[in-house]
Amino acid sequence: MLVDPEMKEIVDSFLLETKEILEKLDVDLMELEKRPDDLDLLNQIFRSFHTIKGTSGFLGLEKLPEVTHKCEDILNKLRKGEIKLDSSLMDGIILGYDTIKELLNVIENDKNEDIKVEGVTTQLVNLLESIIPGNEQEKIPPVAVESLPLNETKNDIKISDTGKDSTLSKSNSNETKKTDNTIRVDVDRLDALLNIASEIVLGRNRLAQLNSQFALEYEGTSFSKDLADATKQIDLMTTELQLVVMKLRMIKIGKVFNRFPRVVRDMCKELNKEVELVIHGEDTEVDKNLIEEINDPLVHLIRNSIDHGIEKPELRLEKGKNRKGTVVISAEHEGNNIVIKVVDDGKGIDPEIIKEKAIAKGFLSREKAKELTKQETYNLIFHPGFSTAEVVTNVSGRGVGMDVVKTNVSKLRGTITVDSEVGKGTTILLRLPLTLAIISGMIVKAYGQTLVIPLHSVIEVLRVSRDHVETIRGKEVINLRDSILPIISLEDLITSNGNGHKHDEKWQYIVEVGIAEKRFGIKVDELVGQQEVVIKNLGDYLGKINGIAGSTIMGDGTVIIILDINELFNKLESQIDS
């Protein structure tokens, strides 16, 4: 039945629905461990397993219904009060949950159930039989099974006219109403809509430019006034359209955050630590493409906080701390960026230990170590192969982790900052663009060319005396608040347009930018302004050019390039190493 072409639509619907149920179950099971006596939660979890069993049985599957049935047996006795939830039962239910996820993955990719589950089902049966029944509580009547709504998946986004996710309804009529108001749209269609909106943004910019030119020549005429009014209306509607289209692609970051309680639980059991995970801002929305990219970096940060940051319970008590450590992950909007923080109240990062480890691994000379600022020292943890773990375990010590975070954040054109206090804890801050298609850009001129620097990478704009631009080993730098800021010139990247370029003989503009944990300055001759721009690729003819993220079209029809801050930093780093 899984490979029957006529059943493809039914099988796909089953996979989508079951994935959604499993996502919700992941959250609910972690909550159940905290609230084992919550009958409503128990009933909800029972219904989820029951739904999976029923739909998988309809498709003629055997192993999936078998595993879910064993989990259902345990949950049924729990909700009837015949047994009490303990750690062994919880581990058994989670084992069943993990097996169901593994089975679903095989069903989706291989269209079969070719994995062994006998050991799991036997373990669940033995676990249930080994428990001595306690005093029976009030029997809970069986609940009606309700199908769960479909939600966001890899290739689809759910859109509802209520602006909120669908929830289980109290009655069939309400459920029907919710379904009527929700549709599932393929992401490719939304991408096409976004491309059209992007073209309209370019047309809006062109119209604004023409209106400005017309106003200069025909100021005061009724036609000039009418054109200005029409331009304002088009500008307003284009902005509204852009916001609506972007909103359609937005997904709550809770979709990622909700996976972390399980990560924390598993690590605590493995490391014999006690950690409470606190989540804030899970309703913060980001672009779907971003959601898919930030999961791995955040998992690394959470694992790192627990492994390297949070101390053992006994050691925390000796230090006068609560025996249970705390890791807080939060998200919030800040302009056109999303800011994600991971904060722990662990032992913090000792800069001297970081330096010694870097020296021992050959990343750093002892002379250079003395020159590093506190922030530069923290940034050493992002070096590939760096680790402070004394013993290699399943969790840490292999020097893989923070460099992966840096790589992913750089790819998303974001920045990462580390702050720590020994004995108090560590804060890691990620700042990422909300969308990767339409960006706010700083328009500058350098060597006769007009360029765009993505605004989310800009930290500040400096005007320094040219006498203050110094040279170290042939590379230009400036001293910025007792920190050395490397300077990169765009002369090698672009060619003068032939008209010559003018710059102030006394002052030099420098745009300080950040990518991941690194900071550097870009020399420019003139600051033009700020504008929303649409990133266009350079096409097959030009292909990929290092240092250039793409191009955009200005209001007067001019095509200008958008700088790739990540590539420019790689170029700067190679110059420093050479």
Image (tube, grey):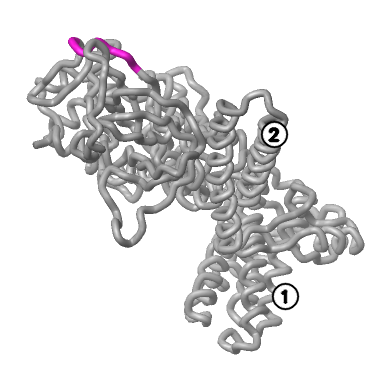
Classify residue 243 by image quadrant.
top right
Between 174 and 350, the one lying in front of the other is: 174
> Which residue corresponds to the image point at 65% horizontal and 66% vertical from the top-left?
71
Instruction: Please determine whether, in this image, residue 520 is positioned above or below residue 182.
Output: above
Q: Secondary structure at mark 2?
A: helix
Question: What crowding class fits label 2: few (fewer than 14 Cα within 10 Å), some (14-19), or many (20 or more)?
Answer: few
**What residue would you read off at disc 1?**
54
Q: Secondary structure at mark 1?
A: helix
Residue type pointed to by label 2 = Phe
Q: Quadrant of the C terminus?
A: top left
**What residue would you read off at disc 2?**
223
Instruction: Please determine whether, in this image, residue 169 is positioned above or below residue 501.
Output: below
Q: Nearer the viewer, mark 2 or mark 1?
A: 2
405 horizontally vs 155: left or right: left
Q: Is residue 465 magenta?
A: yes
> Which residue corresponds to the image point at 53% horizontal and 74% vertical from the top-left?
108
> Which residue corresponds to the image point at 14% horizontal and 30% vertical from the top-left?
364
Residue 432 point in image, percent of width and height: 47, 37
Residue 228 point in image, percent of width and height: 66, 32
Residue 195 point in image, percent of width and height: 54, 55
440 horizontally vs 353: left or right: right
- Kindly tell me whether residue 500 is visible in this rendering: yes
Question: What crowding class fits label 1: few (fewer than 14 Cα within 10 Å), some (14-19), or many (20 or more)?
Answer: some
